[in-house]
Image: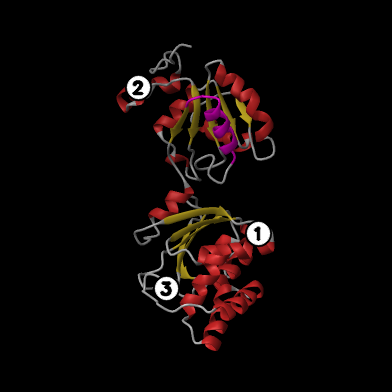
């Protein structure tokens, strides 16, 4: 297959921009699957390389044609679109792999941000790699990195968990596991579940743990508000749900409440205390169960809290 002409002779839109001088030719436009990041909301955030790939690809696999078609039209790009979303991704893999096997260049985009990160596309990416097809990232906007960049999190580990499980008991174990993590955490949440999630996080996390709540990133009503776990439910209740949320939970400070190992805590939990601690934890939020167990046993609350979190992660 011939390499697309960089200057796009005969194409008024591409001919108006000096693509070669912009560096488009620095990387070969080889056959393969191109994972293309698109704007979260502000169309001006699209990259020059994304525009070039979307224009030159043989087809574009999109999460929703109603979202991607207007974006492409805004930049004068007309391209064949193939719908690939969470409900049909598995069945669309085979025909896309056939295209890739013929040496075509297929672009993959989601409704906003970077595909295959809590969005459709991961199954296709895995299948393409398993088939020996080249998978090429075209980096750009991402709500994950956008929120992290303005959160000012402490240096150290950052754990991304995406959307929480839907089932209640699984969710509670999920929150307890996260609460025992000392590093920064990034969570996605849908607007209709945000109120419940806020209360569950308030119950599971130490009350003073710092949280950045980001929503409508790069859009007209963008909101970036810093709060604490204790104040999170009130903040969410005071603002009408709009768009998906990104929550950045800061790392615990050295020697913080949820970090008994770093503090050098020598205390151990005796078997009897551990048994009824776990029973309390099965019926109460981890922070509350640890507080009750600490008052009765005299053991440090942080030690008991951490034990619940570690057990939740094992379960």
Q: Secondary structure at mark 2?
A: helix
Any mark on residue 38, and which? Answer: none
Give the spatial CA distance, label 2 vs label 3: 53 Å
Q: Which residues are magenta?
A: 120-134
Q: Is residue 68 rendered magenta in the image?
A: no
At x 42% / y 13%, what residue is drawn? Answer: 9
Mark nearer the viewer, 1 or 3: 3
Q: Quadrant of residue 290?
A: bottom right
At x 40% / y 70%, what residue is drawn? Answer: 261
Dot 1 or dot 3, earlier in sequence: 1
Image position of 246 with respect to 63: above or below: below
Give the spatial CA distance, label 1 vs label 3: 35 Å
Image position of 202 with respect to 102: above or below: below
The reply to whether the C-beta atoms of the residues labelled 1 and 3 are less than 8 Å apart is no
User: Is 46 displayed left or right of 68 in the figure?
Assistant: left
The reply to whether the C-beta atoms of the residues labelled 2 and 3 are less than 8 Å apart is no
Image position of 294 with respect to 250: above or below: below
| Residue 230, visible in the rendered structure | no
Q: Mark 2 sits on what residue?
A: 25
Q: Mark 3 sits on what residue?
A: 260
Q: Residue furthest left?
A: 21
Q: Mark 1 sits on what residue?
A: 192
> Residue 275, percent across and down?
61, 76
10 Å crowding of disc 2: few (<14), some (14-19), many (20+): few
Q: Secondary structure at mark 3?
A: loop
């Amino acid at each position: 297959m011939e390499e697309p002409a960089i200057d796009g002779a005969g194409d008024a839109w591409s001919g108006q921009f000096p693509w070669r001088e912009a560096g488009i030719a620095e990387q070969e436009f080889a056959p393969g699957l191109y994972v293309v990041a698109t704007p979260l909301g502000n169309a001006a955030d699209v990259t020059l390389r994304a525009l070039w790939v979307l224009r030159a690809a043989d087809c574009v696999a999109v999460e929703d044609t109603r979202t991607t078609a207007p974006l492409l039209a805004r930049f004068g790009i007309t391209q064949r679109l193939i719908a690939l979303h969470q409900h049909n991704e598995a069945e669309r893999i085979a025909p896309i792999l056939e295209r890739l096997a013929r040496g075509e260049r297929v672009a993959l985009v989601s409704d906003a941000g970077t595909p295959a990160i809590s969005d459709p596309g991961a199954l296709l990416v895995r299948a393409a790699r398993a088939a020996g097809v080249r998978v090429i990232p075209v980096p750009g906007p991402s709500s994950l990195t956008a929120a992290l960049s303005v959160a000012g999190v402490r240096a150290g580990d950052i754990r991304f968990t995406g959307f929480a499980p839907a089932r209640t008991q699984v969710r509670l174990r999920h929150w307890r596991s996260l609460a025992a993590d000392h590093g920064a955490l990034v969570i996605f949440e849908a607007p209709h579940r945000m109120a419940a999630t806020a209360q569950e996080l308030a119950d599971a996390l130490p009350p003073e743990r710092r949280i950045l709540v980001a929503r409508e990133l790069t859009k007209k009503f963008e909101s970036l508000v810093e709060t604490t776990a204790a104040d999170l439910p009130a903040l969410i209740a005071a603002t009408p749900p709009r768009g998906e949320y990104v929550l950045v939970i800061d790392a615990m400070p050295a020697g913080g409440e949820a970090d008994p190992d770093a503090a050098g805590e020598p205390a151990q939990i005796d078997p009897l205390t551990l048994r009824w601690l776990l029973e309390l934890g099965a019926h109460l939020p981890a922070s509350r169960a640890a507080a009750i167990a600490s008052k009765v046993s005299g053991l440090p609350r942080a030690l008991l809290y951490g034990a619940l979190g570690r057990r939740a992660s094992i379960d």
